[in-house]
Image (spheres, rainbow, N blue to C red):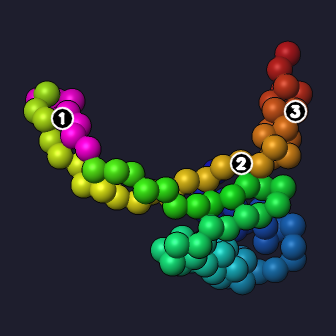
Amino acid sequence: MTKADIVEKVAAGTGLTKLETEAIIEGFLNTVIQSLRDGNGIEIRGFGSYKVKKKNARYARNPRTGEKVFVDEHYVPVFKFSKDFKSAVDRGMKGQEK
């Protein structure tokens, strides 16, 4: 599913236009990105939480050449799904099994 598919489904479910829905979704995504950039975590109850994790500097290997390369310290966004979210997906997938 792409962002355009999500916009279409949300617009159909809310009665908003696709243009309005796209603006809302873009606003949400930009807010998440900006909050993480500022070092703030985000928690959406029943869905999950976003936070930023620091990765220490280390040596790694180039898989193609086997050459040792240095990877600087960096930060990565991480998302942790809520228990409710995981349970809903599990129930849904088990309902599809035959």
Q: CA distance from mark 3 to mark 1?
A: 41 Å
In the rendered structure, which amino acid carries the disc numbered 1? Asn
Q: Which mark is residue 62?
A: 1
Q: Position of residue 77 (x, y in %)?
A: 51, 58
Q: Specify whether residue 64 is painted magenta.
A: yes
3D distance between C-alphas at marks 1 and 2: 32 Å
Residue 46 or 52: which is nearer the viewer?
52
Q: Which x, y percent locates residue 67? A: 10, 33
Residue nearest the viewer, comparing 36 with 92: 36
Query: Which amino acid type is shown beneath numbered disc 3?
Result: Arg
Residue 26 forms part of the magenta stretch: no
Amino acid type, label 2: Phe
What residue would you read off at disc 2?
81
Crowding at dot 2, Cα within 10 Å, few <14 / some 14-19 / many 20+, comes out as: some
Q: Could you give the CA–CA distance between mark 3 and mark 2, rounded to whole angstroms? A: 15 Å
Q: Is residue 82 among the parts visible in the rendering?
A: yes
Range of residues picked out in magenta: 58-65
Q: Say which quarter of the image contains residue 96.
A: top right
User: Residue 16 at x, y = what percent?
Assistant: 81, 80
Q: Are marks 3 and 1 in contact (CB under 8 Å)?
A: no
Q: Residue at left 62%, top 67%?
A: 41
Determine the residue positioned at 82% across, 61% down. 45
Q: Residue at x 76, y 80 (%)?
A: 17
As drawn, the label of residue 91 is: 3
Instruction: Identify the residue at image location x=62%, y=60%.
Output: 50
Left or right, residue 14 beside residue 74: right
Whether residue 66 is situated above or below residue 49 in the rendered picture: above
**Element class at badge 3:** helix
Image depth: mark 3 or mark 2 in front: 2
Q: Of residues 98 and 31, which is closer to you in this image?
A: 31
Q: Secondary structure at mark 2?
A: strand
